[in-house]
Image (spheres, rainbow, N blue to C red):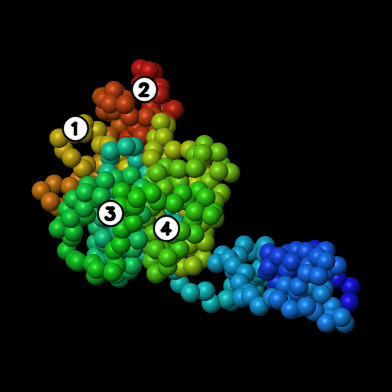
Amino acid sequence: MDRQSPDDFLARHGEFVDPAKLEALNRQAEKFARQKGNGATHPTGSQPDAERDITPATEPMPAARVPPRVPRFVPAYRRGIKVLDGEELLTTQFPPRTTIMSPWLPDKGLAMLYAERGIGKTWIALGAAHAVASGGEFLCWRAERPRKVLYIDGEMPAHTLQERYAAIVRASMKDAPRENFRLAAADCQPDGLPDLSSEEAQRFYDAAIADAELIICDNLSTLAHGLRENEADSFGPVQSWMLEQRAAGRSVLLVHHAGKGGGQRGTSRKEDTLDTVISLSRPPGYSAAEGARFEVRFTKNRGFWGRDAEPFEARFVDGAWTTSEIISDDSDESLHAWRAQGMSIRGIAERSGLSKSDIQRRLKGES
């Protein structure tokens, strides 16, 4: 029998054999072949018979086969794309889309909450998390029923999160079942949290999110620290991860920072797949002594409109949240006062109901 090289054997049986073991066997046989003329003994300890073939064994070494890793999410272009014709689109019975937090967060929904630093993003995110976990209400919003929530925080000290969540729970009318609210905080991890902008690192979240119905990521810059926010392609891995969660039946709320222009910071690609985008801003005349007080606006509202999409003011006073209507004011005095407070033209436009060009003309004293 002709002796096979390791490469030849692996070409035929590489799926089953351990290459390192095969290479070791070949080296052992070659050493014995060189020593045969000098009376060397067989590697097993006995002299082989004359007719014995000392060619290394070519039978597969017993080894456990490791099944290939099956990805949890397979892109459509690999599975094939399902196409509906016009009649199928009209007659197919799709399940109705319900809401996790009415009116703005649907089942399998993707949303973003953004604001400048220190305005109240975590207050809103924690409040929404507890309302969803308990099946209760928060501000002008209502959870249909209790759901399981995973809150991932990459920024705040655990003690601060504890204080804020305690305040949220005290102000709530309902308690959440213990297993419905879970926190994964960077401050509680010796090595921090995995980078959501890395496809490999995303897998480390799999066990934590397995039974979650809502995942809240607070915030994008600390949890996806490899993300280049102004480059659209850089957001691709995070966007794919969010779509993977939606395909698995989960909703995701991203918490993010506002940019200098008043919108969410970085590329607008972040908003492409989102159902809802919520912005928070300071009301005119705000002072730090007032604590948590901000205006809430929907800058993207897919699937809801009218009064449900109207802006409102929220304030945390004496351990309770209150909301009130925002009254538009387009007087010259208010326009100049808002501009003096550092409010952007876009922010003034939202607050006053005027167009940005009208505001610029009036600020310049033009009629």
Disc 3 marks which residue?
A: 126
User: How would you rate the neighbour count of disc 4 (Cα within 10 Å): few for under 14, some for 14-19, many for 20 or more?
Assistant: many
Asked whether the beta carbons under mark 2 and mark 1 sit within 8 Å of each other, the answer is no
Q: Position of residue 226 (x, y in %)?
A: 49, 42
Question: How far is the residue under mark 4 from the one under mark 1?
Answer: 32 Å
Q: Amino acid at mark 1?
A: Ser
Mark 4 vs 2, N-terminal side: 4
Disc 4 marks which residue?
A: 252
Foreground tag (4 vs 1)? 4
Question: How far is the residue under mark 2 from the one under mark 1?
Answer: 26 Å
Disc 2 marks which residue?
A: 362
Disc 1 marks which residue?
A: 287
Q: Amino acid at mark 2?
A: Arg
Task: Identify the residue at image location x=36%, y=47%.
Answer: 154
Mark 4 vs 3, N-terminal side: 3
- Which residue is the extreme one toward the left? 318
Q: Amino acid at mark 3?
A: Leu
